[in-house]
Amino acid sequence: MTVANQKGGVGKTTSTVNLAAALALHGLKVLVIDLDPQGNASTALGVEHRSGTPSVYEVLIGEMSILDATKTSDQSPNLLCVPATIDLAGAEIELVSMVARESRLKEALTDEVLNELGVDYVFIDCPPSLGLLTVNALVGAHEVLIPIQCEYYALEGLGQLLSNIELVQAHLNPTLSLTTILLTMYDGRTKLADQVAEEVRQHFGEVVLRTIIPRSVKVSEAPGFGQTVLTYDPGSRGSMSYLDAARELAERGAKESR
Ligand code: ATP
Ligand code: MG
């Protein structure tokens, strides 16, 4: 599942790591691929990502197998991560001249690799752009999850993301579908948050998860401790809401595989 939205700061990384941690807590094995040179998902999972650390960069340029770049988060043996280092910042340009530049990640994510890791879910955290890294994430996945912040301007740029998804579906990855939208950073005190949530639901219907992630200080504090909110403050509203959202995801997945 690729977590994408070219708008910055909408909760892509927060949703990636907390959904992954919630599924891991329930005994599923989850791999998070950090595809953002900022390395925020790696930080939140407490995984080393200094320049030079084996990372998704070496995987994309074909120097390393995903198996050799995967680390286990100290938060759970069920939570794996391929970290991103700052080296990835150059990849967007380096990839341009490479063969099959849009499907480097897909080629690395073989069935053998996934079986060897024994993972039930893979989440790919995208950078805030529609460049080659995000295209690689869209080509390498079956599903897209778009986090939408319950704020003004939230829907701006969404059309462009949707048309990129359609382009990838048409030319590079026919198995891709937009299955999930998660409303994030909801502030119940504002009318605006309700209006945005309502508008998104009207437009996207069933794709939108019932669970809405509230704005919560605990959620934003957790990465500073190299943790997800699930270990940082398990009983907090933010933690409970990500557990609910993960349950919805898992139930949908179970329905589909029946
Ligand atoms: P980028 O585009 O830079 O990768 P992003 O889409 O991954 O950003 P996040 O990094 O997940 O977004 O979130 C942006 C900021 O908002 C972070 O500081 C994060 O801690 C904070 N944040 C995310 N979700 C919540 C929430 N539910 N409550 C409070 N703060 C939140
Ligand atoms: Mg991010």
Image: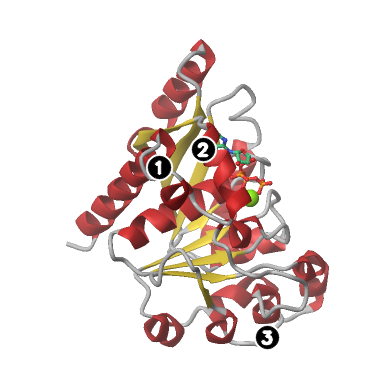
CA gap, disc 1 and disc 3: 37 Å
For label 1, the crowd category at 10 Å Cα-Cα, with few meaning under 14, some 14 to 19 and many 20 or more, is many
The amino acid type found where label 2 is placed reads Lys
Q: Nearer the viewer, residue 163 or 131?
A: 131
Q: Quadrant of residue 90?
A: bottom right
The quadrant in which the C terminus is found is bottom left
Q: Secondary structure at mark 3?
A: loop
Where is mark 1, residue-wise?
A: 239
Q: Quadrant of ligand 1?
A: top right
| Disc 2 target residue | 218
Cα separation between marks 2 and 1:
8 Å
Mark 2 lies within 8 Å of ligand 1 (Cβ measured)? yes
Q: Position of residue 13 (x, y in %)?
A: 57, 50
Which numbered disc flags the more N-terminal residue, 2 or 1? 2
Instruction: Please tell me in which quadrant of the rendered image residue 244 appears.
Output: top left
The residue at which mark 3 appears reads as: 62
Give whichever of discs 3 and 2 has the lower sequence position: 3
Residue at x-position 65% and y-position 36%: 157
- At label 1, the amino acid type is Ser
CA distance for labels 3 and 2: 38 Å
Vertical arrangement, residue 210 with respect to residue 40, above or below: above
Residue at screen point 36% across, 69% down: 29
